[in-house]
Amino acid sequence: MQDVILKISNLSKSFGPVQALRGVNFELRRGEIHAIAGENGAGKSTLMNIIDGILQPNSGQILLDGEPTKISSPTMAQKLGIGFVHQEIALCPDVSVAENIFMAATNVSTSLMMDYRKLEHDAREIFAQLCDIDPSVLVRDLSISHQQLVEIAKALTLDCRILILDEPTAALTEAEAQTLFGIMRELADRGISIIYISHRMVEIFDNCDRVSVFRDGQHIVTQDVADIEPSDVVNAMVGRVIDNLYPHKQETPTEDIILDVQNLTETRSFRDVSFTLKRGEILGFAGLIGAGRSEIVKGICALEGDVKGEVRLEGETLSLRDYPDSIAKGMVYLSEDRKGDGLFLDLPIADNISALKVEQVANRSGLIQADSELQQAEALARKLNLKYGTMRDPVSSLSGGNQQKVAIAKMLSVNPRLIFLDEPTRGVDVGAKSEIHRILRDLAEEGVGIVVISSELPELIGVCDRVLVVREGQISGEVSGSEMTEENIMHLASVLDAHAVA
């Protein structure tokens, strides 16, 4: 079915002097999965927020089924059959999964009493398509990946004609993502049109029919995915040729060990974990979500759990009481949830960068010295090529890639000997990813220990010198060199014989 359900004509939107969209044209066909690609700040979110009625354009026209339409609010968008699953999770943590899923229907209900049994029954029917989540549990007790699935389940309850998915797999396991892709194709086969926003080229080319590229608030190109190469999409996104997304790897491994972990055990999460990290190398941690990757590194840093075993940092045996002890020893952890745990979004950039150890920029009385704080922040901003207005701007004003650079700067502010980075490029566009990968390699070559946890296997293979695979709380194997393939990593992450490599 090739008829156009949504047509955007010459749409523009500005925020004060900033032109977010410039004369954008876009068409969505009925029953297609249409990918939107572009760097952070390209205008993708602004356009989607206009389609969903969150924002109003300054000029231009929206046509639904050929009829000029003004979408004045998200409520009107829902009435018009438009559903939007945002990248940022927006659930009520203190009520149940079922209540979250049917919140919109509950708000318009005239019933005086809540039928919790029916809510949970209906929610279970929705989750039968996705995964096994108990609708009666509180949202705050769910993992990030399961919270993302709740957001998707909410959208599936709406009678959508158009479904917008903004980075829906960012927090999902591979199995959960594949289930979502199957549901997307089923919806498209029923005539529902899907706008799919993603930075992951493999998802776009495996699951979408067409792709549109945006750059600097303008529509650059639209093509059938069969008629364009991933490299062409990347180059259109950044406006230049990116020959190599990953920096060179260490050619001659050193024998100088930065980190030596032996028999690390936390009875609830992992057991008998032993590994080493050599100076100059980047070590990766792979595994399915829930395998214990994050728990291992949090245990090393004394962030959580009652951990037993031996940890030696540059030959020194560590005995850490809490995370401040870890920071004092020069060992820091960058959270996978940068907006929840990694940054203070409403505070200035400089305040965020100094937050991990404010005494470094304070006088003897403990008062923060603005000049010292600013000098520290500006020096790290130059090192990381941070794009910003002023250091007093809130972190929320930055693109996703630059927010992540602020989070990394915060780690570097304490002159660390070792950094654990959990999903360091989640939700970051391809240009910023390339820069972050270069930053990690530069740090490794400067002698800083680098350990990367990532669910993106191409990233682990591209940026790491070795990859340890975690399965059910244990290291099931190690891959390096020519053995570092997606097939081998997935085999170690999932098979019963955890020590066999295909």
Image (tube, grey):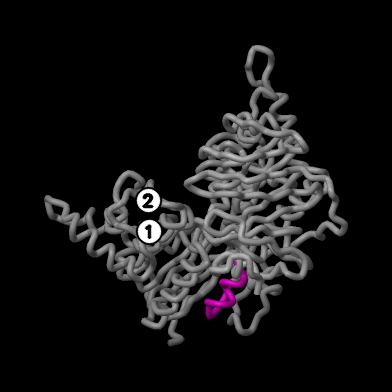
Rendering coords of residue 21 (x, y %): 56, 60
Amino acid marked by disc 2:
Leu
Residue lying farthest to the right in this orientation:
252
Q: What residue is rendered at 72% in x and 55% in y?
A: 437
* The N terminus: image quadrant: bottom left
Q: Is residue 259 left or right of residue 250?
A: left
Q: Is residue 20 covered in magenta?
A: no
Q: Nearer the viewer, residue 226 or 425?
A: 425
> Is residue 16 visible to the viewer in this orientation of the structure?
no
First in sequence: mark 2 vs mark 1 = 2
CA distance separating discs 2 and 1: 8 Å
- Residue contact between numbered discs 2 and 1, judged by CB atoms under 8 Å: yes
Residue 184 to residue 387: above or below: below
Amino acid marked by disc 1:
Val
Q: Nearer the viewer, residue 222 or 168?
A: 168
Q: Give the residue at mark 1.
A: 150
Q: How many marks?
A: 2
Q: Nearer the viewer, mark 2 or mark 1?
A: 1
Q: Give the residue at mark 2.
A: 91
User: Is label 1 in a helix, a strand or a loop?
Assistant: helix
Q: What residue is rendered at 38% in x and 47% in y?
A: 141
Q: Quadrant of residue 41?
A: bottom right
User: Is label 2 in a helix, a strand or a loop?
Assistant: loop
- The magenta region covers 200-211
Q: Is residue 489 left or right of residue 378?
A: left
Residue lying farthest to the bottom in this orientation:
1
Rendering coords of residue 89 (x, y %): 44, 52
